[in-house]
Image: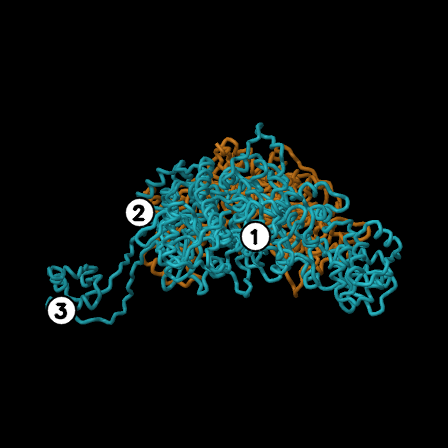
Chain colours: A cyan, B orange
Amino acid sequence: MSTEDQRAPRSLAAALRARDDTSLAALLRARPDLITPVPTDLTQLATRAGTRASVVRALERLDRFALQTAEALAVAGDPATYAELLGLMAGDARDQAVADALPGALTALREQALIWGDEGSLRLVRTARELLAPSAQHPSPTGLGPSVREATAGMSPGRIQELVATAGLPSTHDSVSAVGALTALFTHRKKMAALLAKAPADSVDVLKRLMWGPPYGQVTADPAARLRWLLDRGLLLPTAPGTVVLPREVALHLREGRAHRTAEPVPPSVEPVATHRPQVVDATAAGQAYTTLATVEELLKDWHEGGPSVLRAGGLSVRDLKRTAVALDVSEPMAAFWVELAYAAGLLASDGEADERYAATPEYDEWLERPPADRWAQLAQAWLAATRTSGVVGGRDLKERALSALGPGLDRSAAPEVRHRVLTLLAGLPEGAVPDREAVLARLRWERPLRGPQGQQSPQGAQGQQGQQGQQGQQGQQAAQGPQGDDDLRARLARWTLTEAELLGVTGRGALSAHGRALLGARSAPRPPATASPTPTPTAQDDPTGRSGPAGPAGPGDKLPAPHRAAAAGSPATPLSPLSPLSPLSPPEQAVATAAAARLLAPLLPEPLDHVLLQADLTAVAPGPLRRPLADVLSVLADVESKGGATVYRFTPGSVRRALDAGRSASDLHAFLTEHSRTPVPQPLAYLIDDVARRHGHLRVGAASAYVRCDDDALLNEILADKRAAALRLRRLAPTVLATLADPAALLEGLRAMGFAPAAESAEGDVLITRAHAHRTPPRTAPEPVPDGPPVPDTTLLTAAIRAIRAGDLAATTPRKPTEDAAPLAPGELPRTSSAETLATMQAAVLTGEALWIGYVNAEGTASQRVIAPVRVEGGFVTAYDHTADEVRTYPLHRITGVAELADD
Amino acid sequence: MAYVNGPLIVQSDKTLLLEVDHEQADDCRRAIAPFAELERAPEHIHTYRLTPLGLWNARAAGHDAEQVVDALVQYSRYPVPHALLVDIAETMDRYGRLTLSKHPAHGLVLTTTDRPVLEEILRSKRVAPLVGVRIDPDSVAVHPSERGQIKQTLLKLGWPAEDLAGYVDGEAHPIELAEDGWALRPYQKQAVENFWHGGSGVVVLPCGAGKTLVGAGAMAQAKSTTLILVTNTVSARQWKHELVKRTSLTEEEIGEYSGTRKEIRPVTIATYQVLTTRRKGVYPHLELFDSRDWGLILYDEVHLLPAPVFKFTADLQARRRLGLTATLVREDGRESDVFSLIGPKRFDAPWKEIEAQGYIAPADCVEVRVNLTDSERLAYATAEAEEKYRFCATTATKRKVTEALVRRFAGQQILVIGQYIDQLDELGEHLNAPVIKGETSNAQREKLFDAFREGEISVLVVSKVANFSIDLPEATVAIQVSGTFGSRQEEAQRLGRVLRPKADGHQAHFYSVVARDTLDQDFAAHRQRFLAEQGYAYRIMDADELLAGEA
């Protein structure tokens, strides 16, 4: 093994084997799909890392520069030298910024196991190469065509000789060397320049049109002279009848060696466009946070006695959403947001009854009891982690089904990651600084170009259109390259994030608030020393090379529309980066952060008041939030007319009646108003209460399910007096009428038992049964976020996985000492020895402490190979330290197929 | 500590609550008055509302969004929702993207500073017939006759146009205020000034605050021929009387254009009624507008402006227009037409403020509730829906209460106001007082009014003809026995009857007699809410209490 370390690795597996545990851990953290399930050894790990699905995933997570690097590698030789790659990336002009950033990008690519090999022979993983290299089927994002060798593959040797001759090269006798000569000419800057200098001007124009791609053009059967000149020299090569392509080498010459029109080594910076005083930001955000609580409470209060029904397909009907929006006095998308927020926080759910409806959960009642800041923090935390996105409500899914609030299909796995990333960018700015929305979006696009429509393709797309105006048309790469019709999901998520953060009060006036910062787990940015001046570094402060990309757990596994996928497949890879300090937090860390946020927010929330102002126009104004008991009584006694920082209540005869119905007497109400009013109770209001009270209860309504009617009062007296009638709970309503809650049948029965002979009357009376209030679902858990792909493993899991892989690798690759007179084992075959021999070897190993390689068949009959160090052999069992499983295990001897000693080295 | 303890609370529904007892309340009121409409002014917390119209009014008056936002942020007790600030900026930004101006070749042109807006409005079907040729990408010709129409339409589309096309001076005519022994009050001067500076617009003043003088002041500013539109003939005479008394104008210079007389003089007072008379589908009196080159058009009681007059007014956009009213509340909700056709609100003073300055009398408002008798209750319950109000409003019990009140205020000038003629006749008979109603001739009316003014008669029973513009300076008690359902502006007018400043500084009394537990009470509640919102606290009394106090 030591020898192997010295030599250049010959395969990805070998390269992986040479990496240390830390570096393997980084790989697994970046590509968690590789350890689900844990591979048995490094060869398997390498194989898995090379599968198309995994590579596509990894490529999608690359930032733009790493992706460009990978794209360049895909058009470079295989393997490529560092110098060659640098040429492609930095151009002949040797762009210094690119040169500086390139090693970082390579490190990232290497860490993700997308490339391997040292600087002399950089190799892009084959699958990635296939995905990124230009081919006739799918164009390269670089806009480069096939190489001369590829383009001339189907050409007759005679034709090739002609090309060579016309290009002014000595003729050769075999096509291979001819193509080689041609390639050499095209890649030689000086000679090529000389050749092109001789070209007619309009021919050069043609080349220029194709230079940035797409490299294909159309020609007629009888090409014009300027094209003929190019075709004769191989500067354009035919690919199919009527189609020509600009060979890669020629294009690169024209581009001065650059694979991309613009390499983007540095992420676009997110600069503040405005700065507010942090106090203003925090206060605004706190105000909005308070509104959040009020809105959620109002929503659930509205649904207090049973919310809207659940659609058969799940979710809230459009009409119910509209009604909710009206009730909350917000737009429908906002209503959808609040509903989803409450749902995500586990405050509302479907009650699961036959006639399914939405209702508050028991959790809601607990939530109500908490201090306001905690309530907010709980909502904000739920929002941060939720994969359900209200933004898509009202849209349609791929099957053209409408997406409804609370309904299925709202999960967008990328949401938490984008949310976190956007907020992190905000957190990178000084306090109170507001970034430009577009700059944030540009930054996100840079970090995940493959997830965005305007990857670097767009410049070429534009170019392509110009090319089209020429006589050469272009082959339909446009479709593949053009922006995907659908607005890019990540950009939309980012926009929603900014809007929702403002709504929730995570941001205020567009800047991240102090409690918002705490929610992210960030240390609060240093307050500017002088209160007013903003901190001097206005840029987002993650390191430029470093994609502090959320090497995040929550992979965006969105359901991409098909065109999206195609485009995604067409490209490259990423650098992975050291986890940014603001990577999403683990649940315990988040809990701490949330608590910190609540602590910061608490003093900013308005203190509940215990008084209102009463006015003669029969209104009461609460100049701030009210203490809950006061608010509860007032909301019964008066109608809310206007909400916001203050609340305006209006007293109407209806509302006063409601309070009387709720069991309060007029004098209670007078006392209540006098106690809580800062101002004298206006006479009209006092009069109103008395006036309503005067009429209240004049008419009485009650529920009875049966009555006894008799013209003879005396008989009724007798019945009432009878002890046996007690169970019937009869009540006298009038001299000749008794009523009871017992049902008519029971009443009849009872009276008959007492010796009367009652006759039943037709049961035409209305029976009023009061229903229990406060409809609640059974206990419900909040919906789990749906990340795509497995979560990022924690350190414990990673260490274990790596140890397991290493051990497996050890088992699979350690040379074994051939047992005498046993046929050498085929790879993967289990060692076979007689049981006596097994026992003897084991016992010897216990004494020497050696590790052994065993074949083992488990209870299910699955065979495996393991490396164990026996500790004890007794009672038909061997107890041993299992290197493969990294723990001490006990194996029944009879299940061990055989044993072999490990080779010495 | 995060909150400045400001006097203002900005609600999410765009109302602003101002705590009047706060030390900064006055500053704050001044800061927000230009752009927010005072909606309610009860004793402790005043409610203002932000409306697009109000914000555009502010723009028209030269305020910008930044001032508005600053004012809100500065005085607000709680953080102002960002969305609201954005919304204000956006709304205000819509004003002035389009401007109407004069063009040497095309007459009137509509120009824009924002081409897409022009494209958008030109695509509207309602705008298309009003505009002419497209002069260049940013401007389009407008038929001068459609100046009002297009302003109205654009306002409805949400892109109010700024009218910079100016005014014609009209035929000059010397008019001076004859300030002998009296002078315009400061707020009246301010109103005239604001109006003149703005060119056209509406002045909102409470009844009794001297709107006629504001009109006279405006005429003295304009010094040109003036057309005055008023609600009825009595009011026309009143104007004439007042103008002769307060200005250099003589009887001969003032013409009356009404059903009975058709005089056209340098200053002509016409009634809405005559203008809107239709014969064979045409309005024969419309030529009045063109009969002279008017330099100023005055609209009295602009909230009563009948819809056809709006149509004519649309054609008068080149003339200066002044609207006078006690309230911009129109029961038909056509406030925006007033804005686009007459002009934005130029001056506004809350009743209470003027009362505090001593220009209008303080008033004691009382609602007296009477009980229906058992037989009346039964009859009321069985009455047809359309008869119900009439039935409860004219209950006999009211008569007793009214008589008791008249007795109580014996010696003071008392007006009894009602809706139903037979009720009034009956009251007149019992109170031994003359009744003025629709059929009373104008001569007879003026005779009675004079007698009342002179104190020869102390009780006058009037129907709704008295709602508007008759000056009854010495009435100190008004008793309202029935009203036009729940009309708020009627209530305002009637209260105005007693609010004229009294020679002896007497307190004014305003009584509404209302039948308990009936529609009458509901309507009364609606009207009184309006009073309370104007800051007039009122009491509620039981009739029994009142009658008992009598006995």
The reply, left or right, for residue B104 in relation to residue B429 is right
For the residue marked with disc 3, what is the amino acid?
Answer: Arg
- Element assignment for label 3: helix
Could you tell me which secondary element the residue under label 1 belongs to? helix
Residue kind at label 1, given as amino acid type = Ala
Residues at discs 1 and 2 in contact (Cβ within 8 Å): no
Q: Position of residue B57 (x, y in %)?
A: 63, 44
Q: Quadrant of residue A137?
A: bottom right
Q: Position of residue A438 (x, y in %)?
A: 64, 47
Q: Which residue is mark 3?
A: A752
Residue under circle 1? A13
Q: Which residue is mark 2?
A: A664
The CA distance from mark 3 to mark 1 is 94 Å
Count residues near mark 3 (Cα–Cα under 10 Å), then give few for <14, some for 14-19, many for 20+. Answer: few
Q: Give the Cα distance between marks 1 and 2.
A: 80 Å
N-terminal-most mark, 3 or 1? 1
Labels 3 and 1 positioned on one and the same chain:
yes
